[in-house]
Amino acid sequence: MLFHSAFRKELARSFGATLVVLVTVVMTVMLIRTLGQASVGVVNPSEIMLVMGYTVLGQLSTILTLSLFIAATATLTRMYASSEMVVWFSCGQGLLSFLRPLLRFAWPMLAAIALLALLAWPWSNAQIRELRDRYQGRGDVDRVAPGQFQESAGGQRVFFIDKQRPDDQTGSNIFIAASEKSKESVTSARGGRVATLNGERVLILEQGQRLETDLASGESRLSEFAEYGTRIGQQPASQRANLSPRYQSTWALLQDFTPAYASELWWRVSLLLAAINCLVLALAATRVNPRAGRSASLVFAMLAFATYYNLLNVGQSWIARERIGLPALLLLVHGGVLALSLAWIWWRQGERPRWMVAARTGQPA
């Protein structure tokens, strides 16, 4: 049908342009955020692009939803402004007639949102957490870059080791300044190597000296050694399981229906339901007021989207605190938004009871 094809083509053009802009903006923001995390040692600087990619993948469901909402609003706004809607209304097409081609155009994106929310979201979060844990779990010697002073993980020691490569287990010209309780020590050695003794990583220093100072009394003691061992951390542990709900698969959330897991399940399911409701809401709310201009609908769309997603965050907190159950909140929030949108469409089509029409015209019912 001409009506369906023309409407879907207009939606496709608007959706494509909006998606490119939003992805560019989100990638720029995430790049700046990831660079900031790398600068403070949260993530590996060599894995910045990987972390950013996983982060964007996790946020892609929200980006697609907002792109659909803006595309539908912009398309309907243009059609109202150019009087195309008047033509379609005069041909017998009501507002509800636009819902079918709108959903027919959006169903591939809705399917993608469902996959991203239910599968990609926990997977990307787990991958980011694994990268961070692996980088944070390095030993003190592993943190040291060749020829640079580096602070230890606990901030109690400063290392300098002259290594050929960052992953070498041996080094030369070693310097360690440590502060423990009421003592300070400065240790230097010609060389050293990393060994594992009784499950702990130990740095074996060779041919050096150690200066210890008691901060309370001010006494100092200088000693020389041929070999000296200092603990530098636990042996690298295997990948540990994380019990946080956001890192669990959707199937695991369904099997263990605790409040924390239910709140995470609410968020994932809500991403899909919110995308569907945003399409219906865009159809109900979009219209052109000549006094307000075309931008009024887009401003309303952004405010409505922000309000809707804030409700999702509030609902997640309520479920986690056991203030309300998951089924009741799904019906209250998503069912309420859908009912309000459909009632708004019905009102705008003029399909009102006779007593409402009589009240507006002043005639008896």
Image (cartoon, rainbow, N blue to C red):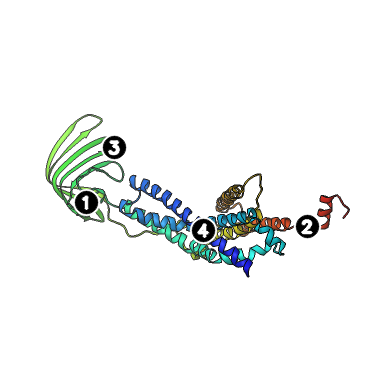
Q: Nearer the viewer, residue 320 or 184?
A: 320
- Circles 4, 3 touching at the beta carbon (< 8 Å): no
Q: Distance between the residues labelled 4 and 2?
A: 35 Å
Q: SS for tag 2? A: loop
Q: Is residue 258 visible?
A: no
Q: Is residue 317 left or right of residue 90?
A: left
Looking at this view, name the residue that lies furthest to the right.
364
Q: Is mark 1 on a helix, strand or loop?
A: strand
User: Does 254 sit left or right of 280 as displayed?
Assistant: left
* Residue labelled with disc 4: 64
Q: Determine whether the residue tagged by mark 4 lies in a helix, strand or loop.
A: helix
Residue 207 makes an appearance in the image: yes
What amino acid type is highlighted by mark number 4? Answer: Leu
Q: Distance between the residues labelled 1 and 4?
A: 51 Å
Q: Which amino acid does label 1 sit on?
A: Val
Q: Residues within 10 Å of mark 2 (few under 14, many from 20)?
A: few
**Residue 202: which disc?**
1
Where residue 309 sits in the image (x, y, percent)?
A: 56, 52
Query: Disc 4 to disc 3, how far (Cα)?
Result: 54 Å
Percent of width and height locating residue 365: 87, 55
* Quadrant of res 346: bottom right
Image mark for residue 181: 3
- Residue at position x 86%, y 49% in the image: 362
Say whether residue 158 is left or right of residue 3. Answer: left
Which of the two discs, 3 and 2, sits closer to the camera? 2
| Dot label at residue 352 | 2
Q: Amino acid type of disc 3? A: Lys
